[in-house]
Image (cartoon, rainbow, N blue to C red):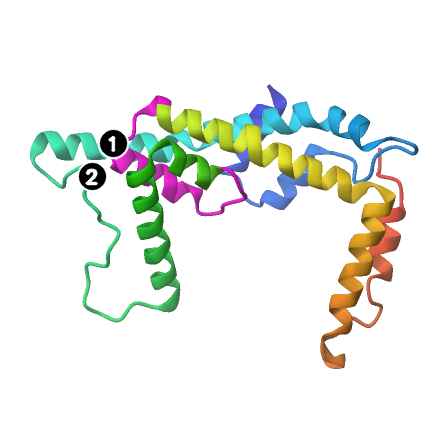
Amino acid sequence: AWWAGAGALACVAPPRGALSRALGLPLQPPPRSSFADAFAKVAPAAMLWGVGTAIGEVPPYALAFHAASVAARTGGVDAGADSSHPTTTTSPRPWDRILTSAAHVTTSLVRRHGFWGVLALAAFPNPLFDLGGIAAGHCGVQFATFFGATLLGKAGIKAVAQAAALVALGMGPSRRAALAAADRLLARLPASLRPSTGLDGVAAALARPAAG
């Protein structure tokens, strides 16, 4: 219940970084722990967190679905109409253009592909997934379809992949390889943009045992 509630809260409670720290997952696995052992310990919690994030996506969908249903009954805007295009002739700001384009792509994806469109939007860390829920409700996607795709994408794919990546990064060889790759990227930057100490401080922090 804690992990599912934390996942639902993550959808609505900033700052998300503070919430992630509150979850208390260790930054690195115990000594002599294999990847399979470490992943088996964190995967259930990660999946429950994914279930919570899926639940947290229901309110935007429900509001949009209700609004579209009311509009359809009263002769307003059609539930499947594309309302993501700008309705003003004034020149939009760059951020407005980005959001408008994202809304258009999201709505088109959900309308054309239904379950698979929602699944694609939910299966990766997508800060604009609220648009997917609103688009699904606006287009009249049924709740079972929307929630099933969201649950599978967030709990079955995204959360599992993120947990696996974090566990792999916490293992000694993977951590050293990642730091070495980052050092190579930093070496390509102009001298004025490089950090004075490189990644030594980061490496030292990662090498320390997790608190608690």
Q: Looking at the picture, how far across and down is residue 123, in whole percent?
A: 51, 38
Q: Is residue 133 magenta?
A: yes
Furthest residue toward right: 32
Q: Residue 140, which numbered label?
A: 1
Please indicate whether residue 85 sits to the left or right of residue 207 in the image. Answer: left
- Most distant residue in the top direction: 1
Q: Is residue 160 above or below residue 83?
A: above
The segment highlighted magenta reads 123-144
Q: From this viewpoint, is residue 8 visible?
A: no
Q: Amino acid at mark 1?
A: Gly
Residue 150 image offset from top left, x and y in percent:
45, 31
Pick whichever of labels 1 and 2 is earlier in the sequence. Answer: 2
Bin the neighbour count of mark 1 within 10 Å (Cα to Cα): few under 14, some 14-19, many 20 and up.
Answer: many
Task: Give SS at disc 1.
Answer: loop
* SS for dot 2: loop
Please state which amino acid type lies under the numbered disc 2: Gly
Q: CA distance from mark 1 to mark 2?
A: 7 Å
Check the image and report above or below for 190 versus 34.
below
Contact check, label 1 and label 2, Cβ < 8 Å: yes
Quadrant the C terminus occupies: top right
Q: Could you say which quadrant of the image residue 2 lies in?
A: top right
Which residue sits at x=40%, y=29%?
A: 58
Q: Which mark is residue 80?
A: 2
